Each structure stands twice: as C-alpha cells, then as structure tokens.
C-alpha cells in the first residue's frame, strides 16, 4: 500500500464516518437549541395575562397579577411591556424592556405614585421576580447566544421522548452554573428544567403543563410550576388570554406607552 | 378556501372593531392612609406645643377607557384630615385628565402630574407641578397642575409641548403645623409679579431621548416660579411671611448613564427671575450589589452632591450639601424595603438623617415607618427652623 492510496482510504473513511462522528454532544445541543428557536420564531407580537401564586413552606399563598405585551425583533431580543395589577400597592407599576442576546438589556420602570420613569440596571439577573421563585433570567426570552450547550441523552418525558440538554449560561451574572432541560423530540417543547446554583447543587425544578398551540404553530404552556428545593417555597405561574398578532409595533413600546400602561 | 379566509378575516375585523369601539372599561381603586406622627421634642414656635399627631388621607382613583383604548379619563381626588394643622387638613384634585392616543403622538389634557429628573435626594429640575409641602418634608407630594400636553414620539426622541393655564400656590404649614419657620406663611395674601396673577399661562417644551446606555432630557420653561420668595409683612398687625411668585425662564437638563451596576446621575438648572439669575446642580452615583452574601437581598449605595450658585444666600437647603444613602431590598414576598439617607451641609455643618422602611401585610395593607432627624449648627441655615421637628412616623396604607 503506497502513501497516496492510504491517504485516499483515510479520506474516504473520514467522509463516510463524517455525519455520524463529527457531531459532538456540544454541537448536538446547539442544534436542538436552534431548532427550538426556529420553531418558535415568527409569532410577531403577543399579549397575555399571568397569575403568579407564591407559596411559602407553610403553604401560605400570595398572589401577583401581571399583564405582558411582547414584540418580536429580528436579529435582536424581544421588546416587552409588563404591567402589574396585583398586589394592589404596586398596581399601575409598569416595566419596559428591550432585551438583547448578549449585551445588557435596556430596562425602564414606571412608578405611578411619583409618575416617575426610572432607567434601571439590568445586571440583576439572578434576583427573585416580585418575591417569587422565578428569577428575572427565568422569565426573559430564550436566545441561543445566552448559553452554551451539551446534549446528554434521550429520555421519556411527558411530551413523549425528550432530548436532555445541559445549558451553561454565558452571562457571568447568571445565578446558575447550568440548567438541564427536557425538550420533546416531536414538537421541541420544553417540559422540565432543573436549575443548578453557583455551587452546582440542585436549586429549583420548573415543570410545564397544559401546552396549547396557537396560530397552528406556537406552543405555550398554561401552567409553569417552579419548586425551590433549597427553601421549600414554590411559585405557580398560570397563563391566560394568550393573543398573537394583535398588531402591536415598535410605537407600543416606548416611555410614553410605559407611562400610560395600566 | 380563499373566500373562507376573507370571510373569517372580515368577521374578526368587525367583531374586534365593534367590541372595542362600544366598550367602556371602568375601574375603581384607591388608598386609605392612616398616619401617626411622633415628634421627639415640642416645637420651638407658638402653636407647636404637641408631640403626637394623627392624620387620615383618602385617595380614590376612577378610570375609564374607551374608543378601543385610544381614549382614557382618570379622576383622582385627594383629601387629608389632620389633627392639629388646619392647613394640612386639605383637599386636592391630583388628577382629572383625558388622554387621547394617536399613532405617534398623544394629547393629555386636564389636571395632571409630571415628573422630570433622575436624582434621589433632591428633585432639582422637576418643575411642572407645585409642591404640596404640608404632606411631607421630602417635597415629593405634588398638586395637580392644569395643562394641555402634546407629546410627539420621533426617532430622535420624545418632544413634549406644554401649555399650563392656571397656577397652583404652594401649601405651607399653618400656625399649628410643624416643619415651618417662626413666622407663619400667610397663604391668603399671596403676591404675584405678573398682572395675570394665578391665571398666567405658562409654557414649556421638553425633549428626551435614550441613546443606548444614556437617557437624557432637556427643557425650557417660561412662567410662574413654583418656588416663592417669602417676604415679611404685617397683616392685621401680625408679622407673617407672604409668598411672592415671580416670573421666570428656566432651562433644565437631566441625564443618566446606566453602566452595568452603576447609575451616574446629573441634573442641571439655569434659572432667570427678576430678583436672581443662577445655576444649580444635583449630581450623584448609585451602585447596586445584587444578592449579597448568597441571599436575595439587594443593597444599593448612593452618593449625591447638591450645589447652588447663590451659596449661603440660597433659599434652598441644598446649596452645598453632600448626601449618602443606602437602599436595601429583601426581595421577599412582602417586598420589604429600607431606604436610609444622610445629608451633610458643607457650609453650615448641619446634618439630617432619614429612614424609610416599608413592608406589605396581606394583599391589601402596607405598613411604613419613617424617621426624619435634623441637626442644624448655624443660625443662617434654613434648617434651624425645623431643628425641633425630629419625627417618627408610622403609616398604614389600605389599598382597594
């Protein structure tokens, strides 16, 4: 066997085995994330209502009522307007966010008592949202660039067979070392996410229930349940009144609309 | 197929159109607020010989929305009953206004409140509304201002045009009220520079814009100065202070840079009145530590400096003052928060300290504890008047 011949043999082997061997678990994870994002793109704009039920260790409940409007942006994170109805002492408070995949989000808070619009720091990713078990970063829109990925295995789940994928936050301000997500292979919906804290111990589990399809394409869960394993508290997030393509545009997301949002 | 699509499209249009156009959305909410004040000392002036004071305030809000959300009306009356001070027992229409929204503009008419500014210890450039000074010494309570405000949204920023018909006089503590000077302000004998008195029509124009990490605003205001000059006068043989409201031109700038956990804040003011022409500044920085020592607690640290060109002759207590503060948020279900601030006057050596703590109880109650302590060291400092007015205040707010 001469050198040229062995070279060609090697080349042929490489080419043949390529599709099977070339994809590392990291690439597989990224590919799944891309598919999740791809399948959820194009909803344009949406609005919905959100009921948060906070439960402490003793089972005592406290309620938050929130409305959200979102506008999809091509090549950038979403714009969103969040309006607080309950608790009553923060009624009329509104929050405007222009999210970006990697740069810091632009965020403004409207305080109705003073009629004041405050530009706020978006560094606080890991802090609790409204005293709940959801951190701000748990509620922000999913962007591919926010994580690096690793496919782990296939496993049966509520949605059939799921990919189990580890997601490692790129942002150093994230409160997590990793998230483990269960994504069904049929529709690429997320069914469960486990959150591991900065010490890499299990902190929270988020489950998605009651998926419904909108516009014959976009899947949204009616219920998201977050359980904190370390403090024994939990938060249910119940969605209702989902409406897509209601005709929102950029002019619905500025400081003027923030001031009269209610 | 095509026809069915067209038909369903039409019915959606008709349904949404009719439902939106005819429907009037109405909402009723509000706040009832009980307040107990404990003064650490008896007041230094006649009429202030008490140390505890009770007060009750009601602020309902009625809101209508119609024309598919393009029109809305809000009505917010306010009334406070005070145990001692007749001037603090008072009512106001905080808001009675109609907003009409167009594509890239909105028109806001009626009695309204507008806030401009970025700093925390002093609201230097906030000029549209008169201060309801009997409410609190922090100057954050405002009287409803009559206005027509056209707001235009452009790529290069938001432009607000204001016509302000009618002027609101500042409220001042009465003879039985605390937090006043030795002479009582006689609000029944107000003087105006303008022959139009409180009917002078003021105008203002403001531009504001966000450039990436920077939020800026610039305005020009022409009209009646919200801050009166206080002149001594004899009314019915008694010495009193008479508020004199002059005309002024004012240019104000506010800017904030939001850089990671840092907020850099600047307010600048140029004011031109017949008796004075001066500039003033309030500038500072706020840094936040999020989730300190593995808890959910956020701690913000604030430093600000206030300066006034008129120096020790200024009719403000923020002429050369340094402020330090901290904002602590527990981020718990009850939204427990603390704000503590310390002010130091570099000219007069006087100090002030305030603390605000608040937490929610149940779904409808909020309890707050406020403390304000004053320590004046120089008779030329305006703070000397309120030196005996150290205060602890417990407030229970009920929301409905």
Image: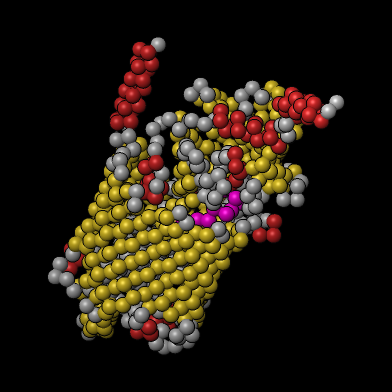
Relative placement, left or right, of B91 versus B202 is: right
- Point out the residue furthest to the bottom here: B379
Q: In the picture shown, does residue A79 fall above or below B163?
A: above
In x, y percent, where is residue A126?
63, 50
Relative placement, left or right, of B368 versus B44 is: right
Residue B213 appears in the figure: yes
Residue A205 appears in the figure: no
Picture residue at 22% right of the left edge, 57% below the top: B163
Of helix, strand and loop, which mostly describes the magenta segment? loop
Q: Is A101 covered by the magenta stretch? A: no
Q: Residue A192: which quarter of the image?
A: top right
Q: Choose between B273 and A254: the one closer to the eye.
A: A254
In x, y percent, where is residue A171?
63, 49
Picture residue at 22% right of the left edge, 63% below the top: B202
In x, y percent, where is residue B16?
35, 26
Picture residue at 33% right of the left edge, 41% below the top: B64
Q: Is A125 covered by the magenta stretch? A: yes
Q: Choose between B340 and A43: the one closer to the eye.
A: A43
Picture residue at 39% right of the left edge, 41% below the top: A250
Tell how many labels.
Answer: 0
Quadrant location of the N terminus of chain B in the rendered image: top left
In x, y percent, where is residue B160?
29, 54
Q: Which residues are magenta?
A: A119-130
- Point out the residue furthest to the right here: A1
Describe the colour scheme in one phrase.
secondary structure
């Amino acid at each position: 066997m001469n050198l040229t011949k062995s070279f060609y043999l090697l080349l042929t082997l490489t080419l043949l085995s390529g599709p099977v061997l070339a994809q590392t678990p990291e690439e597989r994870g990224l590919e799944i994330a891309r598919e999740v994002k791809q399948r959820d793109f194009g909803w344009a704009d949406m609005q919905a209502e959100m009921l948060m039920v906070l439960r402490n260790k003793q089972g005592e409940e406290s309620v938050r009522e929130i409305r959200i409007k979102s506008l999809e942006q091509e090549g950038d994170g979403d714009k969103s307007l969040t309006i607080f109805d309950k608790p009553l002492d923060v009624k009329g408070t509104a929050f405007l966010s222009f999210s970006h995949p990697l740069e810091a989000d632009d965020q403004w808070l409207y305080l109705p008592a003073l009629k004041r619009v405050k530009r706020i720091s978006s560094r606080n990713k890991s802090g609790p949202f409204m005293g709940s078990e959801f951190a701000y970063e748990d509620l922000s829109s999913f962007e591919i660039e926010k994580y690096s990925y690793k496919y782990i295995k296939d496993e049966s789940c509520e949605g059939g067979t799921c990919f189990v994928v580890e997601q490692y936050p790129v942002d150093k301000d994230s409160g997590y070392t990793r998230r483990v997500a269960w994504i069904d292979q049929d529709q690429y919906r997320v069914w469960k996410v486990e959150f591991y804290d900065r010490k890499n111990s299990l902190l929270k589990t988020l489950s998605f229930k009651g998926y419904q399809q909108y516009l014959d394409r976009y899947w949204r869960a009616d219920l998201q349940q977050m359980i904190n394993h370390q403090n024994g508290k939990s938060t249910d997030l119940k969605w209702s009144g989902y409406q897509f393509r209601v005709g929102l545009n950029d002019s619905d997301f500025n400081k003027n609309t923030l001031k009269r949002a209610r | 197929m095509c026809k069915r699509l067209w038909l369903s499209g039409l019915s959606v249009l008709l349904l949404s159109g009719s439902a939106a156009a005819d429907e009037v959305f109405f909402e009723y909410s509000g706040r009832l607020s009980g307040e107990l004040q404990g003064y650490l000392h008896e007041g230094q002036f006649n009429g202030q010989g008490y140390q505890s004071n009770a007060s009750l305030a009601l602020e309902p809000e009625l809101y209508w929305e119609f024309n598919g959300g393009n029109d809305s009306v809000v009505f917010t009356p306010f009334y406070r009953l005070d145990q001692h001070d007749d001037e603090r027992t008072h009512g106001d229409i905080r808001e009675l206004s109609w907003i009409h929204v167009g594509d890239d503009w909105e028109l806001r008419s009626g009695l309204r409140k507008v806030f401009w500014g970025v700093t925390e210890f002093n609201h230097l450039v906030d000029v549209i509304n008169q201060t309801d000074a009997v409410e609190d010494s922090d100057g954050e309570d405002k009287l409803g201002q009559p206005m027509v405000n056209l707001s235009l949204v452009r790529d290069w920023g938001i432009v607000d045009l204001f016509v302000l018909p009618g002027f609101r006089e500042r409220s001042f503590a009465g003879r039985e009220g605390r937090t006043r000077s030795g002479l009582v302000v006689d609000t029944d004998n107000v003087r105006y520079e303008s022959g139009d008195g409180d009917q002078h029509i003021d105008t203002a124009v403001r531009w504001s814009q966000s450039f990436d990490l920077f939020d800026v605003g610039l305005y020009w205001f022409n009209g009646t100065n919200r801050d009166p000059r206080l002149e001594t006068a004899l009314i019915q043989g008694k010495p009193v202070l008479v508020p004199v409201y002059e005309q002024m031109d004012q240019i104000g700038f506010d800017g904030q840079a939001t850089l990671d956990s840092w907020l850099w804040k600047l307010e600048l003011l140029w004011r031109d009145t017949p008796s004075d022409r001066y500039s003033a500044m309030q500038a500072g920085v706020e840094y936040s530590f999020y989730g300190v020592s593995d808890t959910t607690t956020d701690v913000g640290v604030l430093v600000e400096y206030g300066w006034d060109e008129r120096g020790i002759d200024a009719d403000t207590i923020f002429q050369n003052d340094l402020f330090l503060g901290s904002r602590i948020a527990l981020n718990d279900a009850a939204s427990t928060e603390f704000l503590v601030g310390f002010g130091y006057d570099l000219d007069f050596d006087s100090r002030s300290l305030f603390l605000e703590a608040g937490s929610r109880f149940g779904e409808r109650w909020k309890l707050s504890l406020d403390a304000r302590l004053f320590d004046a060291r120089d008779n030329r400092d305006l703070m000397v008047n309120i030196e005996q007015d150290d205060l602890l205040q417990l407030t229970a707010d009920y929301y409905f």
